[in-house]
Image (cartoon, helix red, strand yellow):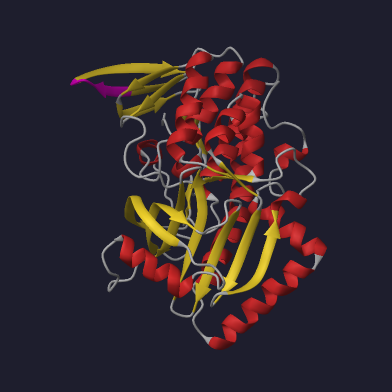
């Protein structure tokens, strides 16, 4: 269940294999503020296998560089287009709404169905899972061979399975905005850090940029003027970007947390149901898409070829992968939050050194792109053919 990028990706892969797939979503699609705004190369490979990569490229911005700035001065500009082990040597800045719309169209075209319903309870044996639903004021029951809980950070499935999801890092409040801005490069995402706070800047689609900063109690209201002031104070030197219009803004608290288990019986967790992380580095949605692909091919293998083996490895393997991705996200958030002069000096030198060393440069891009952490990709098992 869950109609976001993770659930829709799993649905697309499974439905394309001729399996009967039904997505249950509690909320109507595409509501609220789009939090995720970047698709990295590893996830783009999956989008391509589903058949939606070209559509997303048409609406998104091609990002080939990730720049880091300390008090306005460059400490590293890492080049995604130097990657060689992928056909996608760029990240895509694109609204999550567009991503979900493309995936939903592909899912329905493959024969999948979507129902607006709330899961009230579930039970399972060794043959099937049965959920009790509420839709339109009526309750009903639905049984299936497997259940994927891709229903977000406040997952009902996770709660019904009795799985805890403890924090593994600090909780951080953020303010994000999508804005029309002039004077910024169209192919670079930037992290601009100062002792007084930072700001992330990235192409969001072909008509806007995403801005994000930590939200402090004394922060001014979210206005064009306040975001312009932050850009002036924290942005790269030598540029004069102008915030022309705010498309949308949102405040939220982000966690770093991992569920104790990703599987119980015939029920599996993926995406934000299994792990959540702050937006630093743009790792969250992408890791959910990779979860979906890893779980889906295992389900296909289990059903068609090798009962009892493929799915049993999902929990441990994805736990290991997610902890590596989480370490990258936590490191990114920690580096952006440094305030002491000595710590900032050490960080800046570390980034300059990594930038100038070819092997470290590529390793950092491979980690951010999630190309280096996925065992299934190395085995050629990402998506069944």
The reply to whether residue 247 is visible in this rendering is yes
Residue 135 drawn in magenta: yes
In percent of width and height, residue 348 lies at 64, 77
- Which residue is found at the position 64% from the left and 54% from the top? 368
Foreground: 60 or 237?
237
Q: Is residue 304 left or right of residue 155?
A: right
In percent of width and height, residue 229 lies at 37, 70
Foreground: 98 or 138?
98
Residue 73 drawn in magenta: no
- Which residue is found at the position 42% from the left and 36% from the top? 97
Q: Is 264 above or below relative to 372? A: above
Foreground: 311 or 81?
81
- Which residue is found at the position 44% from the left and 66% from the top? 170
Number of callouts = 0
Q: Is 181 above or below relative to 96? A: below
- Which residue is found at the position 60% from the left and 59% from the top? 328
The residue sitting at the bottom extreme is 342
In percent of width and height, residue 282 lies at 53, 52
The reply to whether residue 266 is visible in this rendering is no
Secondary structure predominantly adopted by residues drawn in magenta = strand
Placement of the N terminus among the 4 image quadrants? top left
In percent of width and height, residue 237 lies at 55, 73
Q: Quadrant of residue 327?
A: bottom right
Residue stretch rendered in magenta on the structure: 132-137
């Amino acid at each position: 269940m869950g109609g976001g990028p993770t659930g829709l990706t799993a649905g697309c892969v499974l439905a394309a294999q001729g399996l009967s797939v039904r997505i249950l979503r509690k909320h109507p699609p595409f509501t609220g503020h789009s939090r995720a705004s970047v698709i990295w190369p590893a996830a783009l490979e999956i989008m391509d296998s589903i058949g939606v990569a070209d559509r997303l490229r048409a609406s998104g911005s091609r990002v080939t560089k990730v720049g880091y700035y300390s008090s306005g001065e460059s400490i590293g500009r890492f080049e995604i287009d130097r990657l060689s082990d992928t056909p996608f040597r760029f990240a895509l800045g694109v609204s999550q709404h567009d991503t979900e719309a493309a995936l939903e169209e592909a899912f329905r075209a493959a024969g999948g169905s979507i129902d607006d319903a709330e899961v009230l309870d579930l039970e399972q044996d060794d043959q099937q899972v049965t959920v009790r639903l509420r839709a339109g004021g009526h309750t009903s029951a639905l049984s299936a061979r497997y259940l994927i809980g891709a229903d977000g950070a406040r997952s009902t499935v996770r709660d019904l399975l009795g799985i805890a999801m403890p924090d593994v890092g600090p909780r951080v409040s953020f303010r994000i905005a999508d804005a029309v801005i002039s004077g910024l490069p169209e192919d670079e995402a930037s992290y601009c850090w100062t002792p007084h706070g930072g700001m992330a800047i990235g192409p969001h689609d072909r008509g806007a940029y995403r801005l994000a900063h930590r939200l402090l109690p004394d922060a001014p209201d979210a206005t064009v003027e306040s975001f312009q002031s932050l850009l002036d104070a924290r942005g790269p030197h030598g540029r004069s970007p102008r915030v022309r219009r705010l498309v949308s803004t949102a405040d939220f608290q982000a966690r770093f947390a991992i569920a104790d288990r990703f599987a119980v019986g015939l029920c599996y967790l993926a995406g934000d149901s299994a792990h959540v992380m702050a937006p630093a580095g743009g790792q969250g949605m992408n890791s959910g898409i990779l979860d979906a692909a890893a779980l889906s091919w295992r389900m296909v293998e289990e059903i068609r070829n090798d009962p009892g083996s493929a799915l049993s490895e999902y929990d441990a393997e994805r736990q290991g992968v997610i902890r590596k991705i989480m370490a990258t996200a936590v490191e990114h958030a920690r580096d952006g939050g440094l305030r002491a002069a000595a710590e900032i000096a050490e960080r800046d030198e570390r980034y300059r050194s990594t930038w100038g060393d070819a092997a470290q440069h590529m390793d950092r891009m491979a980690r951010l792109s999630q190309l280096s952490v996925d065992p299934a990709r190395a085995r050629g098992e990402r998506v069944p053919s």
